[in-house]
């Protein structure tokens, strides 16, 4: 299986400041069709996960533009600009290039 | 509006069988893969398997192959996750997912003697 490694695993942030989460895959996520199937999910406490970003940098509908994704190959980043209280939760990266699809361990974002 | 509505929480004993469901609406059920994701208490997300409802083609993650059965009934737009013999280690929240974008509300399965 492709191993997804996130860092940090815990991220205390100050309201209004920015936060970045790194995600590295054990092999390149570029698929034969040229796309890179790397998604980011948010899971607020007590809720189902919600996809924020698909194919590295595309925001899902309704996702604030404070969230942005970047990266290529094996290195990816989720950035949250101007963190708000509602952003508290666990964030997961996930690769969909290979079966089985695999998630990172999760990064817990909390307010300082 | 796409909706995935899962069956309610279950409390079972080790060795019992169980089938949980995921009722899908708001889109063509046979067009997209449906998957199941496990989340053990306080832990992360794990893909269990996926099914293509049009022809019931199924893929399992190696960790779950032989442990569960995924099926779908396209006449009622519903996907299922089935255990023939539960273990305490199956205690978890289970989510159904369509194209990674739409998630069910989760079904909590508790296995305890």
Image: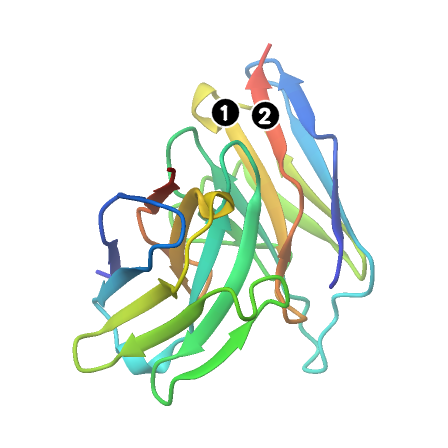
Residue found 20% across the figure and 66% down from its top: B25
Quadrant in the picture for the N terminus of chain A = bottom right
Numbered disc 2: what chain?
A: A
Count of numbered labels shown in the rendering? 2
Q: CA distance from mark 2 to mark 1?
A: 5 Å
Residue B20, position as x, y percentages in the image: 29, 58
Tell me where residue B2 sits by quadrant: bottom left
Residue A65, position as x, y percentages in the image: 50, 41
Q: Is residue A49 visible?
A: no
Q: B113 or A29, which lies in front?
A: B113
Residue found 44% across the figure and 61% down from its top: B36
- Residue A16 sits above or below residue B40 on the image: above
Q: Secondary structure at mark 2?
A: strand
Tell me whether the residue at label 2 lies in contact with that at label 1, contact meaning CB atoms closer than 8 angstroms: yes
Q: Which residue is mark 2?
A: A109
Residue A54, position as x, y percentages in the image: 55, 58
Mark found first going from the N terminus, 2 or 1: 1
Q: Residue furthest left?
A: B76
Q: Residues within 10 Å of mark 2 (few under 14, many from 20)?
A: many
Q: Is residue A53 visible?
A: yes
Residue found 39% across the figure and 76% down from its top: B32
Q: B63 or B52, which lies in front?
A: B63
A111 sits left or right of B27 in the view: right
Q: Which residue is mark 1?
A: A88
- Residue B15 sits above or below residue A91 on the image: below
């Amino acid at each position: 299986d492709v191993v997804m490694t996130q860092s940090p695993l815990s991220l205390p942030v100050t309201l209004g400041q920015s936060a970045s989460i790194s995600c590295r895959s054990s092999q390149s996520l570029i698929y034969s069709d040229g796309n890179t199937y790397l998604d980011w999910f948010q899971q607020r406490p007590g809720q189902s996960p919600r996809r924020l970003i698909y194919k590295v940098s595309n925001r899902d509908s309704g996702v604030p533009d404070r969230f942005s994704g970047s990266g290529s190959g094996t290195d990816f980043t989720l950035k949250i600009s101007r963190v708000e209280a509602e952003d508290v939760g666990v964030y997961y990266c996930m690769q969909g290039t290979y079966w089985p699809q695999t998630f990172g361990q999760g990064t817990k974002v909390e307010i300082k | 509006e796409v909706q995935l509505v899962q069956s309610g929480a279950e409390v079972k004993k080790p060795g019992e069988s169980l089938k949980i469901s995921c009722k899908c609406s708001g889109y063509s059920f046979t067009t997209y893969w449906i998957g199941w994701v496990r989340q053990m208490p306080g832990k992360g997300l794990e893909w269990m398997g996926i099914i293509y409802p049009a022809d019931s083609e199924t893929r399992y993650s190696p960790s779950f192959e032989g442990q569960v059965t995924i099926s779908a009934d396209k006449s009622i737009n519903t996907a299922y996750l089935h255990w023939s013999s539960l273990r305490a280690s199956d205690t978890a929240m289970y989510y159904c997912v369509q194209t990674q974008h739409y998630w069910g509300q989760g079904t909590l399965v508790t296995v305890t003697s």
